[in-house]
Image: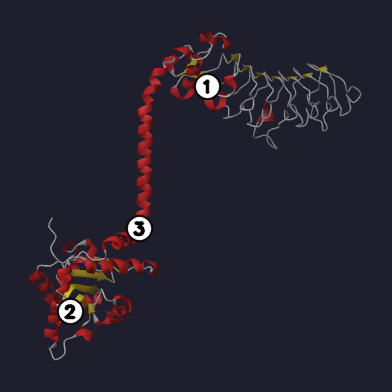
């Protein structure tokens, strides 16, 4: 057995053909620099049948004229594995002029995408009798000049256009027989369709040697017997799947947006609508009948909140009636309250536990507010909740339930400060709603 060194061929710079089949030690090519580096005119290199397991990634460096490389019957499986220490060994990167590459019987079970990159002059590739199964997309995309491809006696089950689309455009000979093909729409439809539209002379023994292994219905039958028409039934189901998936995704996104940003969407929607239509849907004549937009009913403890959060909203188009500020001079307190309620288009309750426990609000103000609503037959109550109050307590104390009012007339004071402008806008909309009963 021959053992090479880095200077083995230093005195043979014009060598063109080198045959070292069945003659090298297994570790003879794991050298840096490569022993072949001085052979810049070399065109033919035979390294077959040597049980080579280790190759330096620079083995072909400097061989710019190499046309034929034979590496069949070695033990190169580990070199192209991604699990190999240091990653795959891309030893072909120095042979850009290569035209014939034979790597049969090497136990290869994977080919890195980068392994054959740049071999645009390669016209014959032989990878027979290996363990290749799932080939990566675009692994053969650089082989634009390929004419002969041999992949027989591997474990290939699927022939996909992402892998074989480019090399099959120019092939004059394809040998892939004795592979366990999976005859299903996903695995073999493209290949069978391609063969039906291609000159089958480029695929010898097509009907005899290209047999289905799975599923059981096609076992041991020629792949050309595969019924491609059955795959057409998948088209409506694929469209239905895409449509249903899209609908579900849109529903999920919408639900999440409403859950986390619903108040912002409503806020900006209201701004858009109200800039076009205005804040009020009340008739002009209806607005002239009242001196105030809302009569405020609140507990004494909530007066500071009213002064801080509601009074600043007053302007030429919005005016509140406050008991302390707007009572009628020279009139009794009870009569003043009743008179101001009649002058107000809305009656606004600031609902807290304190309000529900205030006997003056419960027994007199709430009673007359409801009497005013019933008497005038108007939908004129607005509830602003500063606290979470159970509907039972609300009904027991104020004789009101949330279900009695329109949703836009029930507001909750926001916990987060950034939502306060949205609350103010919703309040102005509620105050601008018509008091006339809506017909359903």
Kindly report which numbered mark, 2 or 3, lies closer to the viewer in this rendering. Answer: 3
Label 2, secondary structure: give it. helix
Give above or below for 114 relative to 184: below
Label 1, secondary structure: give it. loop
Query: What's the mark number on residue 361?
Result: 2
In the rendered image, the quadrant that contains the N terminus is top right
Label 3, secondary structure: give it. helix
Q: Residues within 10 Å of mark 3 (few under 14, many from 20)?
A: few
Instruction: Determine contact: label 2, label 3, CB under 8 Å.
Output: no
x, y percentage for residue 381? 18, 69
Q: How many labels does the image show?
A: 3
Nearest the viewer among 52 and 320 is 320
Query: What's the mark number on residue 157?
Result: 1
Q: Is residue 184 left or right of residue 236?
A: right
* Sequence-first disc among 1 and 3: 1
Nearest the viewer among 131 and 380 is 380
Q: How crowded is mark 2: few (under 14 residues within 10 Å), some or many (20 or more)?
A: many
What's the CA distance linking mark 1 and mark 3?
A: 52 Å
Q: Which residue ends up furthest to the left in the rendered image? A: 375
Q: Residues within 10 Å of mark 1 (few under 14, many from 20)?
A: many
x, y percentage for residue 308? 33, 79
Query: What's the mark number on residue 265?
Result: 3
* Sequence-first disc among 2 and 3: 3
Residue appearing at x 28%, y 81% in the figure = 303
x, y percentage for residue 3? 85, 23
What's the CA distance linking mark 2 and mark 3?
A: 36 Å
Kindly report which numbered mark, 1 or 3, lies closer to the viewer in this rendering. Answer: 3
């Amino acid at each position: 057995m021959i053992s090479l060194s880095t200077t083995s061929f230093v005195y043979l710079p014009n060598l063109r053909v080198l045959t070292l089949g069945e003659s090298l030690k297994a570790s003879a090519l794991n050298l840096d620099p490569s022993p072949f580096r001085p052979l810049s005119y070399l065109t033919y290199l035979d390294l077959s049948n040597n049980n080579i397991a280790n190759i330096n990634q620079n083995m072909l460096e400097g061989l710019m004229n190499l046309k034929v490389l034979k590496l069949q019957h070695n033990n190169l499986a580990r070199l192209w594995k991604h699990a190999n220490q240091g990653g795959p060994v891309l030893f072909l990167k120095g042979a850009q002029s290569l035209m014939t590459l034979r790597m049969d019987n090497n136990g290869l079970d994977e080919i890195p995408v980068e392994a054959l990159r740049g071999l645009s002059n390669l016209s014959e590739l032989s990878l027979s009798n290996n363990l290749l199964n799932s080939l990566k997309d675009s692994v053969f995309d650089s082989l634009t000049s390929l004419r002969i491809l041999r992949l027989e006696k591997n474990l290939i089950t699927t022939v996909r256009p992402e892998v074989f689309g480019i090399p099959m455009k120019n092939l004059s000979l394809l040998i892939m027989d004795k592979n366990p093909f999976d005859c299903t729409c996903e695995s073999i439809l493209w290949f069978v369709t391609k063969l039906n539209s291609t000159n089958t002379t480029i695929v010898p023994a097509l009907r005899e040697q290209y047999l289905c292994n799975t599923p059981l219905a096609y076992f041991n039958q020629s792949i050309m017997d595969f019924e491609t028409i059955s795959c057409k039934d998948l088209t409506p189901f694929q469209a239905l799947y895409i449509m249903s998936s899209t609908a579900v995704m849109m529903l999920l996104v919408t639900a999440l947006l409403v859950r986390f940003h619903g108040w912002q969407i409503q806020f900006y929607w209201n701004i858009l609508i109200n800039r076009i239509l205005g804040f009020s849907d009340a008739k002009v004549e209806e607005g002239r009948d009242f001196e105030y937009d809302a009569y405020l009913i609140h507990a004494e403890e909530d007066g500071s909140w009213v002064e801080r959060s509601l009074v600043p909203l007053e302007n030429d188009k919005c005016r509140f009636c406050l008991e302390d500020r707007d009572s009628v001079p020279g009139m009794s307190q009870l009569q003043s309250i009743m008179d101001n309620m009649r002058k107000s288009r809305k009656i606004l309750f600031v609902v807290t536990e304190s309000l529900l426990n205030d006997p003056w609000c419960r027994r007199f103000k709430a009673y007359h507010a409801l009497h005013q609503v019933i008497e005038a037959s108007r939908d004129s109550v607005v509830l602003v909740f500063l606290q979470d109050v159970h509907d039972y307590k609300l009904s027991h104390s104020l004789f009101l339930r949330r279900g009695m009012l329109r949703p836009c007339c029930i507001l909750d004071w926001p916990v987060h400060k950034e939502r306060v402008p949205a609350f103010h806008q919703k309040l102005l909309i509620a105050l601008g709603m018509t008091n006339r009963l809506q017909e359903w």
